[in-house]
Image: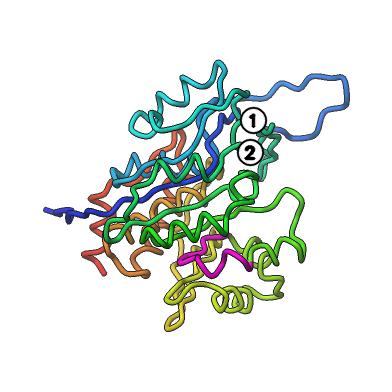
Amino acid sequence: MITRPDTRATLYVVGNINVDLIMSTLHAWPKKGTEAMLESSSLRPGGSAGNCALALSALDVPHRLVANQGNDQFTGWLASLFPESAPHWPTCDCETSLTFGVTHPDHERTFFSNQGHIVRLSMQDVLPQLPERAQPGDWVLLCGTWLCTALYAEYPQLLSALRSRGYRVAIDSGWPPEDWSDTLRKQAAQWLPFCDALLLNEVETLGLAGAETLDAAAQKLLTQMADNAFCVAKCGPDGARLWAADQTLHQHAEPVEVVDTIGAGDSFNAGFLSALIYGLPPATALQWGVRVAGCAISSSPRRYPDWQSLFGLVEKL
């Protein structure tokens, strides 16, 4: 029988939660002024922070979703899905952030989003939701970086405050809507020194570093990050790779039948950081991240592995 070890650590997920309306499958863009009928639709919580928190709840990992909320017909529904976290969320007098997405035959997707409440999330909203002093092993994940525009403007001050409180910090910035530029890279150079773990996909890693190869990009970013940090690249069907000062790791992914790729990287983040919350090594964290993501993208309705199966991987190692 597998026994899960105790942990006093908590993962705090800070960033964007919104409503997702996903429709499938769009085979060709319709002409203006016409209507297209699609086979299926799904209304669900989304956003990088929301997707990660849903996975953490399923994994039964100690966590809290640190966010804000709008003030409309979606407010109560979103809050009801995160009952442990929502009572701490400040309310903005604005519409809820909403994303409409369509999936294509190759399982890629196109998103359309309004601004809503997530662009109003600020450091003054975030810090009161976090303990003044971190417990040993506590992590903060900052995600939806480029979409939480008010909070991003305060990243240097926010990260300094998190460091002073004793938190380790992971960042999944995502892809900037305006694309990468030297200006964005210079801005990132201000907060990378506070970053203990960078969790991006392949193209995001290349874009942030402005490098030609993944290895060169990761090594470049690692030199700008905190001591003993690691840079992770999520590589889809090829699994995930990790670079640290003393090691380079690659975790292969098991082949799965892809059903829904939305939130795959966020599910990886949940699995990866869950292992760290339990004090497990980076190799195990990579394995957990890949396993959680693979389970998520191959299921509908979405499901995740239970903690017994994840700790079973530890025993196999």
Residue 37 image label? none
Image location of residue 150, percent across then percent down: 63, 44
**Farthest-out residue, left:** 1
**Residue at label 1?**
116
Q: Which residues are magenta?
A: 189-200
Work out which residue is located at the far right of the displayed protein and give it: 32
Q: What residue would you read off at disc 2?
A: 119
Question: How is the structure coloured here?
Answer: rainbow
CA separation in Å, label 2 and label 1: 7 Å
Mark 1 residue type: Gly
Q: Quadrant of residue 104?
A: top right
Amino acid type of disc 2?
Val
**Whole-percent x and y of residue 294?**
45, 51
User: Image check: 85 left or right of 239?
Assistant: left
When the figure is inspected, residue 310 is found, relative to residue 222, above or below; the finding is above
Relative depth, front residue between 261 and 166: 166
Q: Secondary structure at mark 1?
A: loop
Quadrant position of the C terminus in the picture: bottom left
**Residue in the picture at 70% in, 74% down:** 211
* CB within 8 Å, label 2 to label 1: yes
| Crowd band around label 1 with a 10 angstrom C-alpha radius: few (<14), some (14–19), many (20+) | some
- Residue 223 within the segment the image draws in magenta: no
- Residue 195 painted magenta: yes
Q: Secondary structure at mark 2?
A: helix
Q: Residue furthest top?
A: 73
